[in-house]
Image (cartoon, rainbow, N blue to C red):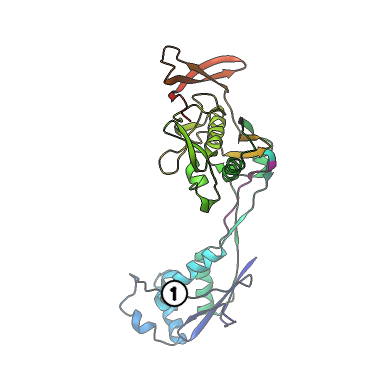
Amino acid sequence: MIFSFCPVKIQKQNFCFANQNFEFKIENKNFEIDYKNQEFINLTKLRKEVTKKSVEEKIKIAKKIYSMGFDKKTILNYIYPNIDVQIDKIAENVYIKPVNAGIKSLKNCKIEYFYEKNGVKIDKNKIYSAIFDNLVNGEICNLEFEQIIPTVKYEDIKGKYFVCGEFKTYFNTENEERTQNIKKAVSSINGVLLKSGEVFSFNDCTGVRNEENGYKQAKIISNGKYTEGFGGGVCQVSSTLYNAALLSDLEIKEVHGHSIKSAYIKPGFDAMVNYGSADLKFKNNLSNDVLICACVNGNECRVCIYATEQKYKIKERFEIDESEDQENKIKTSSYLDYYVDDVLMKTTKIRENNYLIASV
């Protein structure tokens, strides 16, 4: 790939300054010119007069200023105001961001590795040098693109990702509206790549649960009662994801329980979401990216989280406080047990819940 400079006007691929044309041709791309006012500190006293001079006079001035020790970029900005704005635009247009090798989600929570792609950039200082040399010496310069090498290569990660957290819940497919909402939410979170240190937000990912976004009305839990509302069933997806995140040992930043116990999940392991007021958030506290894969197979809602590391095998459990008045509420405590080679290393209490007895 070549960046060509030639002082001949061809179609729209040119720069026009006073009575001289500079053409920059890059892979048949055309560049438009937008002038903007810009002040320069150096050589400002004579600048207004210089910009009105002929090309021949400008060349003489450029040579003289260059002999005084000024750099080529400063000289060109002095003679042709705002040329830096145009060169910046060319560099931005040419720039191609490198792509690291990584993984992407396929059907049924499977993954596929993909190769890295080199990026492309051009050194703006070399552009200035090429223009100056052409202006002063008549030299036509070809500037090669510089490759940007990705930091993560295919060989670095191939075969290193595995399912570190997987969870399944089940639902009634005969409830068509609820089923559609579950599938909609699942499709929203499927394939999300969370870089190390990033925080995932369920609400940001799935968006507002309303008719405009494709959600249907179905049963939701509100203040200890079942009622109709847009997005019924979405909490089953957030709860499934929450448990997969727990089993992956990701750092939970925000989670809320329902007011009553959900039938599809163990007590103390549900994750109620409500756009604008209650979210599920967790942080990728691992050293590499993690990939969220989610799918629906028949009546199964499944979430797998892929990572390159897993220190513990984690198991979930809950306890019901039998001393509480069971006529009005159910108090539960939920725990995570951490194992290494089937040896229990530690136990963490993650939360307590007070569920009301369901009121239909």
* Circle 1 residue: 76
Give residue 88's position: percent from left, percent from top: 48, 67
Q: In which quarter of the image is residue 166?
A: top right
Q: In which quarter of the image is residue 176?
A: top right
Q: Please say if 255 is above or below 75.
A: above
Residue lying farthest left?
45
Give residue 358's position: percent from left, percent from top: 47, 27
| Quarter occupied by the N terminus | bottom right
Amino acid type, mark 1: Leu
For the point 55% across and 63% down, the residue is 122
Q: How many marks?
A: 1
Is 228 in the magenta? no
Q: Give the range drawn in magenta.
A: 96-107
Q: Please say if 276 is above or below 148.
A: above
User: Does the image show residue 200?
Assistant: no
- Disc 1 element: helix
For the point 43% across and 25% down, the residue is 356
Q: In which quarter of the image is residue 264?
A: top right
